Amino acid sequence: MLYYLYASPPYSVSRYCVDDTMDNICKQAKPLNDEWRGSSRPGTGKVDRTGLPEGWYKFTSHAKRMANYPVRKNFCGAEYPIYMDGDHAEKGTCAQKTLFQVYADNNWTWKSGKIYECQCMNGDY
């Protein structure tokens, strides 16, 4: 899957212009291949503290897609991990998804922002 990370603060999605050809989006995505990003990997302190620049990213390790279920506190390199809500995008499509962040003792979450998710026509994530 490909993910479009917005710069902070997030603006209305209607203000963003993205390359509308799936082939170009699939080619221009930057890989994120850190093993510590796995939802079953315990540990903290490895998050992107300075923030990633706005743009397209793709996971190239583990299941190669963002977790779409609550991830336990102190996993994925973060004290409060972020996960995506809902089903993953279908092949050849993009969809806007809501991000959530785990808080407290895994008892509650809060809405963290929006992200675009796309799946390339060839099924690559």
Image (tube, grey):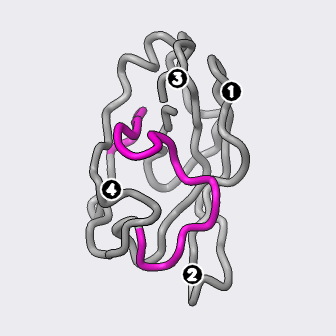
Q: Nearer the viewer, residue 95 or 55?
A: 95
Q: Residues within 10 Å of mark 2 (few under 14, many from 20)?
A: some
Magenta region: 53-75
Q: Residues within 10 Å of mark 3 (few under 14, many from 20)?
A: few
Rendered location of residue 124, percent (x, y): 48, 23
Name the N-terminal-most of marks 1 and 3.
3
Q: Whole-Å distance between the Cαs marked 1 and 3? A: 19 Å
Q: Is residue 25 above or below residue 42?
A: above
What amino acid is found at the position of numbered circle 1 in the picture?
Glu
- Residue located beneath label 3 in the image: 18
Residue 64 occupies quadrant = top left
Sequence-earlier tag: 3 or 4: 3
The secondary structure type at the circle numbered 3 is loop
Task: Write down the residue under mark 1.
Answer: 90
**For the residue marked with disc 2, what is the amino acid?**
Tyr
Pointer 4 local density, CA inside 10 Å: few below 14, some 14–19, many at least 20: few
Amino acid type at mark 3: Val
Asked whether residue 78 is drawn in magenta, I would say no
**x, y percent for residue 107:** 66, 85
Residue at label 4?
51
Residue 58, how many percent across, how many down? 41, 35
**Residue named by callout 2:** 103
Viewer-nearest of discs 3 and 2: 2
Residue at left offset 49%, top offset 37%: 4
